[in-house]
Every structure is written in C-alpha cells, then in structure tokens.
Amino acid sequence: MNLEAKSEVAGPRSIPNTYVAKPWVYHMNKPILLIDDDRPYRQALRLYLEYHGFTCKEAENGREALVLLDGGLDVDLVLSDYHMPVINGLDFLKALTYRAKGKDVRVILVSGNMTKEIEKEAKEAGAFALLAKPYDFQELLGLVVSRADKT
C-alpha cells in the first residue's frame, strides 16, 4: 500500500507531512555528535536527523564523547543532554572549550529540567542553543539546519 492510498483510507491528516515526503535534504561536511545516556531516545534522534540527510555519531555520556573527539572524531555540532552520569552536558561543554579543535564546535544543550541557573551557566560556557525537553523536533531541526548553513 503506498502512502497516497493510505492517505485516502485514513484521511489526509493521519500521516504527518514530515513522514510523507522529504522536500529537501540537508548535509553537513562532518557528522553531528549526539550525547545522551537514554539510548532509545538517542537512537530515535539519530534516525530523525539521518532521515533529513545528516550523519550522526553517538556517545552515552560526556566522557565517552570527549574520548571520541580526542581520538580524532571531527564534528561541527553536538547535541548533548544536560543530566548524564560520569560527565554531564555542562561539564562536557566546558571541557570542549579547552580543546583547540573544540573552539569551532557548536553545542546544543537539552534538559528535561531546564532552570534559569542551567541556562545562565550554559550561555557563559558558550552553548550555541538551549532546548527544554520535550522539545519540538522541527525547532531542533531548525537549529541544526542553521548550523549546517554556516559550514
């Protein structure tokens, strides 16, 4: 059954436009690094971004991400959760700014418990953007695309 036939049976509002067709596909020269200790969430985010043409790498926490970066992974953009074991998103962001190749990397920090204090610290540490969970995936895609347009 093709999507058009399903649309006629289920009604036009049953299938969100984002799943029916990809009117454009975005590309970055380098992968996006996704850091989150919630594996199913991280994988769903990776699938969403890959659907839109991006390449992604994954890390379970800030320490694992730093090991990947120190091992030669070259990225322009990082999406990091704030609350994680080992090294949280804010500490990762601070550690990244001390690395020579980390100075041009943009970090989008997300949190399910976004507070004014977290926002202030993240901005001071150089976060590219902050998002409170749950966030709108279209808003996230807009931030990613804005970074892709600058690479």
Image: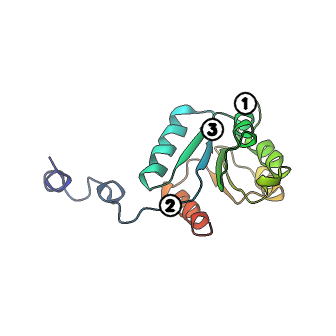
Instruction: Name the residue located 51 percent from the left edge and 45 percent from the top edge.
Output: 45
Instruction: Name the residue located 46 percent from the left edge and 49 percent from the top edge.
Output: 50
Amino acid type, label 1: Pro
Q: Earlier in the sequence, mark 1 or mark 2?
A: 2
Find disc 1 in the rendering and name its residue. 85
Q: Nearer the viewer, residue 102 or 127?
A: 102
Circle 2 residues within 10 Å: few <14, some 14–19, many ≥20: some
Kindly state the secondary structure of the residue where label 3 is placed.
loop
Kindly state the secondary structure of the residue where label 2 is placed.
loop
Instruction: Name the residue located 13 percent from the left edge and 51 percent from the top edge.
Output: 9
Q: Quadrant of residue 88?
A: top right
Mark closer to the observer (3, 2): 2
Find disc 2 in the rendering and name its residue. 27
Q: Earlier in the sequence, mark 3 or mark 2?
A: 2
Residue 36 badge? 3
> Could you tell me how far apart the alpha carbons at marks 1 and 2 are, in whole angstroms?
31 Å
Q: Is residue 134 left or right of residue 1?
A: right
Mark closer to the observer (1, 2): 2
In the displayed image of the protein, which residue is found farthest to the bottom? 150
Task: Give the position of the C terminus as an image quadrant.
Answer: bottom right
